[in-house]
Image: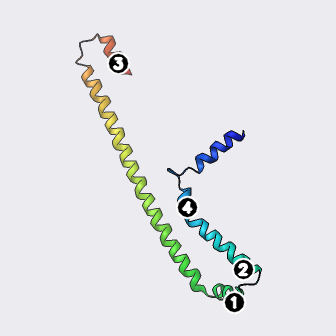
Amino acid sequence: CLQECKGVWLQVLRCSGSVLPFGATAAIPCCLLTVALKVFAAEQWLYVDRFADDVILAPQAYSGFSGLLGILIVFRTQQSYGRYWAAVSLTRTMGNAYFEAASCLVAFSRMSKNSIQDKASFQEV
């Protein structure tokens, strides 16, 4: 079981084709900065209460963040909606191509010199 778990984690953490290394480049510095600020505040090397009160009482920070987050969500949703409809139209095009190919095979098999039973067997498939 240990070997199986190790294989799963190696698959998750692989560098090729994974989003984890890219996400880690943004997440690890933020994590380290957060830990450093928390340690500085706990040891009282950094006085953050005044800064925290100013940010909490000022609604501009929240409104700016909410506006930016809203724009990003709308953009990503619109982009994924466009990709969905592109995939639907391509899937329908692919289905139409398969139907046309099957129709041509059946039409061409009618002109075959094989027996009627062989033609009927082929057309039923």
Task: Choose the circle earlier in sequence order: 1 or 2.
Answer: 2
Query: How much space separates mark 4 and mark 2, taking CA atoms?
Result: 26 Å
Residue at image location 58% in from the left, 83% down from the top: 61
What is the secondary structure assignment of the residue under circle 4? helix
Q: Amino acid at mark 2?
A: Phe
Give the class, few, some or many, for how many residues have Cα within 10 Å of label 4's Cα (few <14, many ≥20).
few
Three-letter code, disc 3: Phe
Q: Which residue is mark 4?
A: 23
Percent x, y of residue 11 = 59, 46
Tag 3: Cα neighbours inside 10 Å, few (<14), some, or many (≥20)? few
Real-space Cα separation, disc 3 to disc 4, in angstroms = 54 Å
Name the side, left or right, on which 69 lies relative to 107: right
Q: Say whether residue 103 is left or right of residue 47.
A: left
Q: Quadrant of residue 43?
A: bottom right
Q: Which mark is residue 50?
A: 1
- Closer to the camera: disc 3 or disc 4? 4
Q: Nearer the viewer, residue 61 or 52?
A: 52
Residue 40: numbered disc: 2
Q: Secondary structure at mark 2?
A: helix
**Which amino acid type is shown beneath numbered disc 1?**
Arg
Q: Nearer the viewer, mark 4 or mark 2?
A: 2
Looking at the rendered image, the disc whose residue lies closer to the viewer, 3 or 1, is 1
Q: Disc 3 to disc 1, how far (Cα)?
A: 82 Å
- Tell me which residue sits at (61%, 88%) in the image: 58
Label 4 amino acid? Gly
Q: Are marks 4 and 2 in contact (CB under 8 Å)?
A: no
Circle 3 residue: 122
Q: Residues within 10 Å of mark 1 (few under 14, many from 20)?
A: few
